[in-house]
Amino acid sequence: MFLKYIVYLLNIKNMRKLILLTIIILLSCKTETKKNIQTKSNNKEELLIITEIENAEKIKSLNKDFKNIAPSVKSSVKKTISSGNLKYDKLKINYTLIGKWVINNSFLNHKYTFEIYNKGSKYLGIRLNDFTIENLTKKELKYYISGNKYGEFYQVDKNKEMTLFDNDGSLVGAGYTATKIH
């Protein structure tokens, strides 16, 4: 009987359903105690002790099963919050977010969200409008876009304020601004 509950719990993706099912199971254990006491009147105290011990073991087993199931429930919650881009979702799990900005080009009337991530000595920039991933090389406060023929880079100060540059200097004159989100 408990095996069916465990299999059912593994398939649950909604935390409310999981909590509700756990409460139902615990209440059914209590109901079973009352049934046993009412149907068997001989040695009431002995029967009560045996039934309570059985119920305590069932609850311990459920708690143990719940601890094993809880991580899979958390991961299913993460999946529902995913971006829809598997590569980006894996990157978010394996890398540390350095910062998040909205980059705006007022001349082209175009803006997008941009994030910089880090793992060890590796830095990546991601444009969230199309999930373009740029390999970045960090030198002091500057994040250079690897292989960019115009020498474009992002300068991020200690307050996480970003300015965009290329070989000719700041791109503010070309309409580029970055507004910090995180």
Image (tube, helix red, strand yellow):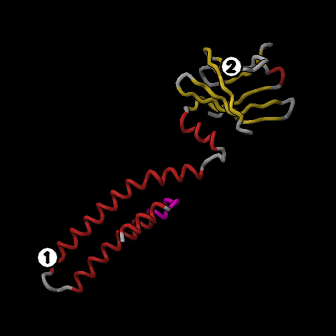
Identify the residue at horizontal 81%, vertical 30% (top origin): 105
Mark 2 touches mark 1? (CB < 8 Å) = no
In terms of image quadrants, where is residue 172? Answer: top right
Identify the residue at horizontal 65%, vertical 34% (top origin): 181
Give how far across and how far down residue 152 sits, in percent: 75, 19
Q: Which residue occupies the extreme right position in the image?
A: 107
For the residue labelled by badge 2, is the local secondary structure a helix, a strand or a loop?
strand
9 sits left or right of 134 in the view: left
Viewer-nearest residue: 82 or 135: 135
Q: Amino acid at mark 2?
A: Tyr
10 Å crowding of disc 2: few (<14), some (14-19), many (20+):
many
Identify the residue at horizontal 22%, vertical 73% (top origin): 51
User: Which region is colored magenta?
Assistant: 12-18
In terms of image quadrants, where is residue 90? Answer: top right
Q: Amino acid at mark 1?
A: Glu
Residue 176 belongs to magenta span: no
Q: How many marks?
A: 2
70 sits left or right of 179 in the view: left
For the residue labelled by badge 1, is the local secondary structure a helix, a strand or a loop?
helix
In terms of image quadrants, where is residue 98? Answer: top right
The residue tagged 2 is 144
- Quadrant where the N terminus sits is bottom left
Q: CA distance from mark 2 to mark 1?
A: 77 Å
> Considering only vertical position in the picture, is 20 above or below 46?
above
- Quadrant where the C terminus sits is top right
The residue tagged 1 is 46
Give how far across and how far down residue 58 sits, in percent: 29, 66
Residue 16 belongs to magenta span: yes
